Image (cartoon, grey):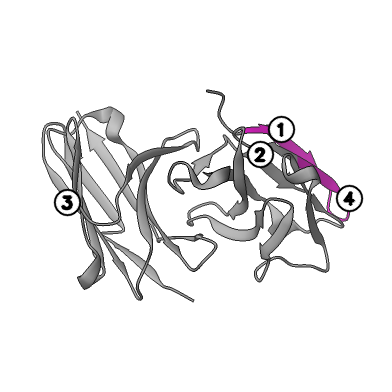
Amino acid sequence: GIQVEQSPPDLILQEGANSTLRCNFSDSVNNLQWFHQNPWGQLINLFYIPSGTKQNGRLSATTVATERYSLLYISSSQTTDSGVYFCAVYSGGYQKVTFGTGTKLQVIP
Amino acid sequence: EAGVAQSPRYKIIEKRQSVAFWCNPISGHATLYWYQQILGQGPKLLIQFQNNGVVDDSQLPKDRFSAERLKGVDSTLKIQPAKLEDSAVYLCASSSPRGGKGNAEAFFGQGTRLTVV
C-alpha cells in the first residue's frame, strides 16, 4: 500500500517562530488533507488540497502532486498550535484515506 | 450542520469481554470509515463502507472485530473478545456526499477511548 512519511517527527518552537512541516508519499494520490490533532484527541481539518497552495490565516499549505509531497507552513506560532499534525492521502477508486506518521509540535511561551 | 457523532466517549473493560462502539455520520455522506489510533501513532484504517457495503477491510482483525452499517447510515464496531493490545482510540469519519455534490473531504468524530485491563 501507499506509504506516507512526515518530517520532522518532533518540533519545539518558541512562540512567534515560523515552521515548515513536510509530508512525502510513495505513489500517486487523488487528494491530500492536513489535520491538527489537539490535546483532547480531536482531529481538526486544516486543508483539503490536491495541488497548489491554500492559505487560512497564519497557516498555509502547498501540495506538489507530481513530486509527491506537501508542505504545511505555520507562521507566528502560538501555544494553541501545539499538538500533532497529520497529513492523510486519498487513493484508489473508493478514496481510501491513509495517514502519515505525524509531527508532534510543542510551542513554548 | 451536525458533525460525526460517536458514543461512548470512554470505555473501560476487562480482557476477554466484548464492547461495541456507535457512529452516526454526517447526514448524506456515503462513505464511512473506522480507524484505530494507538497512543503515539497515526490512525490506522480498520474498515471502510461505501453506503452499506464494505469496500476495504484488509486491516480488520476479523477473528475478533466486526462492523456493520445499517441502511447505509449509522455504524457499529464490535470487539469480541477484547485483548490488552486493543486499548486505543477508535475514530469514525465520514465523507463523500451522495449524488457527487461536493468533494470527498473526510470529517472525524471525537472518538471513543477504549482501555482494556
**x, y percentage for residue B16?**
88, 56
Label 3: element kind: strand
**x, y percentage for residue A38?**
42, 35
What distance separates the C-alpha of mark 3 from that of mark 4?
45 Å
Q: Residues within 10 Å of mark 4 (few under 14, many from 20)?
A: few
Q: How many marks?
A: 4
**Chain under disc 1:** B
Q: Earlier in the sequence, mark 1 or mark 2?
A: 1
Name the disc covering residue B7, or none: 1
Pointers 1 and 2 in contact (C-beta within 8 Å): yes
Pointers 4 and 2 in contact (C-beta within 8 Å): no
Which of the two residues, B84 or A50, is positioned nearer the viewer here?
A: A50
Q: Residue at x 81, y 51 (%)?
A: B78
Q: Are marks 3 and 2 on the same chain?
A: no
**x, y percentage for residue A99?**
45, 59
Provide the residue designation for mark 4: B17
Provide the residue designation for mark 2: B112
